[in-house]
Structures are given as C-alpha cells and as structure tokens.
Amino acid sequence: MHRHAPADYDCPFCAIVRAERRPSLATVPEDVVWRDGRTTAWINCRWWVRNPGGVVVVPNEHVENLYELERDLAADLHETVRRVAIAMKLSYGCAGTSTRQHNEPGAGQEVWHHHVHIFPREAGDGLYGSANRETSPEERQPYAERLRAALAP
C-alpha cells in the first residue's frame, strides 16, 4: 500500500539484526545494546551535535513502515523503546529523552525498515535544527557499554 523499497532492496537494518559486518555499514555488531526475539536496538552511527549516543530500535522482522506494523509487534517494539529510554536517562544522566519515527519519503524516511530513534535531551539543545555527523565505533563504544549495563537484568 505505502511501500517504497525497490524489489531488490538489501535492507541495512536487517543486516544489523543479523549481526553482519559489511564494509558498507557504519554500524557494527558491538553497537547493539539490546536484542530479544522481536526487537533490536543499537547506538546510531549518526549523532546530532549536542545529542551524542542516540539509539535506533527496530523490529527484527522486516516491516517497511508504521502502516505495516502489527499490533503485537508494535507493543513489543514500544516496550523496547521505553526500556532503552529509561536506561538512557539513567546511564547518560540526560535531562530527558525524545523519540522520532518517519514513514515514507515525504516524512523523511531514509531506510525502508520501520525504526524509532531515541535521543538523549537537554533543555535548549536544539536537536531538531542541529547538524549531524557520522561517528566511529570507538566513539560509540562507551555509550553502548553504559546502555548495555543499564539494560542488563
């Protein structure tokens, strides 16, 4: 109904869920902070200037957008988003968190796999107007370690 991925789409987020290492992927398996039977979360390789350590959460099943997300999977995904946001607040010491999710090109969706961004926030940080940059695995590692520790049972 509202699909935009080409027929031969090689989904990068599915590769991350499968813990693949690819030269074309900036995300590495060590960026993953949470994985269960239905969802995976990792430190985003793209950071906004005053919001380092953002996370991407996806359903493990390939679902292109919110319109295709089944109710039970949506509940599991949202629970992972909630857990990661709490862990982020506790382990980063940020003032709050924001989530962001896009559907279709007109709304800014760039990867054809449903995903939710979680950002650490501070008052006046200007997240939605700031620039972003690619990061290295070494920059992401301390954030991944803190989140994994906070998410541990």
Image (spheres, rainbow, N blue to C red):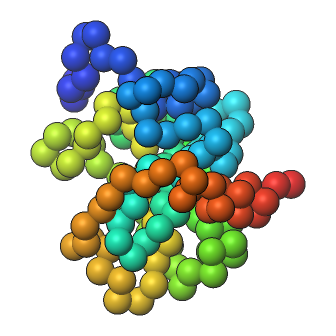
Figure quadrant of residue 115? top left
Q: Is residue 73 visible?
A: no
Relative to the observer, which residue lies in front, 46 or 10?
A: 46
Question: Compared to 108, does 14 lie above or below?
Answer: above
Could you say where residue 49 lies in the image, as x and y percent from the top left?
35, 71
Farthest residue in the right direction?
Answer: 153
Residue for point 68% across, 39% down = 35
Farthest residue in the bottom direction?
Answer: 123
Q: Is residue 99 left or right of residue 35?
A: left
Figure quadrant of residue 111? top left
Figure quadrant of residue 129? bottom left
Could you say where residue 71 lies in the image, as x and y percent from the top left?
51, 38
**Quadrant location of the C terminus in the rendered image:** bottom right
Residue for point 76% across, 63% down = 150
Relative to the observer, which residue lies in front, 151 or 114?
A: 151
Residue for point 53% across, 31% down = 16
Q: Is residue 145 visible?
A: yes
Could you say where residue 130 lies in the image, as x and y percent from the top left?
25, 72
Question: Compared to 51, does 110 lie above or below?
Answer: above
**Quadrant location of the N terminus in the rendered image:** top left
Question: Compared to 89, does 136 lie above or below?
Answer: above
Residue for point 30% across, 17% down = 9
Q: Is residue 123 left or right of residue 6?
A: right
